[in-house]
Image: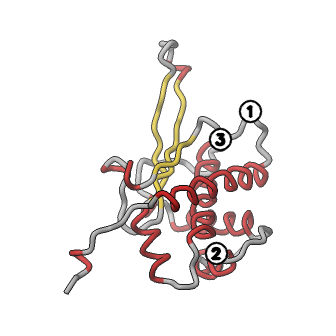
């Protein structure tokens, strides 16, 4: 008999990775349009998305579907500190996502990925705009109020999107949005 401790977690397969790619493209447009970011302000070259197979140990979390990790970079040809920049990595936790999709028959992977990625990109924009201060900590330790605010913003961005399965995702995350009271 197999127990939870004996279970081996699965990573996204090739088809699921294509779904991640497709969701990421849509999410970029949705978040960009919501925040009315110009092409010079947009997140290009300011974030990356990694899936569990490629995560470093410190990028892996137990529980959340994803987390944002901030890195500091500097242009190699410019020695001055003014060339430093922040790069955010959205660390998707494939096992947690796949377990949730598998455990809930009404949840479909693509709309679930759409929600998770919009949610994480909203965090990135809020960090870049200093709406919320980034602290080196896991998604689980982000303040409850901030998480609720981001869930509310995520719903606002995705609510106008007509897509099969999205209403079920809204229902799944409803507790976060409604507790925020907006």
Image position of 145 with respect to 85: above or below: below
Which residue is at the front of the view, 157 or 55?
55
Tell me residue 61's x, y (percent): 37, 60
Residues 162 and 89: in front is: 162
The answer to whether 144 appears left or right of 36 in the picture is left
Residue underneath mark 1 = 40
Q: Which mark is residue 76?
A: none
Expressed as whole percent of the image width and height from the top left, the position of residue 147 reads: 56, 65
Q: Residues within 10 Å of mark 3 (few under 14, many from 20)?
A: many
Secondary element type, mark 1? loop
**Which residue is rendered at x = 38% and y = 48% of the image?**
54
Residue 80 lies, in percent from the top left, at 50, 14
Q: Nearer the viewer, mark 2 or mark 1?
A: 1
Contact between labelled residues 3 and 2, with CB atoms less than 8 Å apart: no
Would you place residue 130 above or below residue 10 in this image?
Answer: above
Q: Which sits in the foreground, 64 or 13?
A: 13
Whether residue 39 sits left or right of residue 142 in the image: it is right
Report the residue marked by disc 3.
43
Q: For this rendering, which residue is in front, 58 or 23?
A: 23
């Amino acid at each position: 008999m197999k127990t939870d401790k004996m279970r081996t977690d699965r990573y996204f397969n090739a088809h699921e990775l294509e779904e991640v790619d497709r969701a990421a493209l849509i999410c970029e447009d949705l978040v960009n349009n919501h925040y009315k970011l110009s092409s010079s302000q947009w997140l290009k070259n300011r974030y990356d998305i990694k899936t569990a197979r490629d995560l470093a140990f410190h990028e892996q979390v137990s529980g959340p579907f994803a987390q944002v990790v901030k890195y500091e970079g500097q242009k190699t040809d410019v020695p001055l500190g003014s060339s430093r920049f922040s790069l955010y990595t959205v660390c998707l936790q494939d096992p947690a996502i796949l377990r949730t999709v598998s455990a809930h028959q009404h949840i479909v992977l693509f709309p679930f990925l759409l929600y998770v990625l919009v949610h994480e990109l909203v965090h990135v924009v809020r960090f870049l705009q200093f709406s919320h201060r980034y602290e080196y900590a896991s998604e689980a330790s982000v303040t409850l109020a901030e998480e609720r605010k981001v869930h509310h913003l995520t719903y606002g961005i995705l609510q106008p999107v007509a897509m099969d399965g999205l209403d079920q995702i809204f229902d799944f995350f409803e507790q976060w949005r409604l507790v925020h009271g907006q």
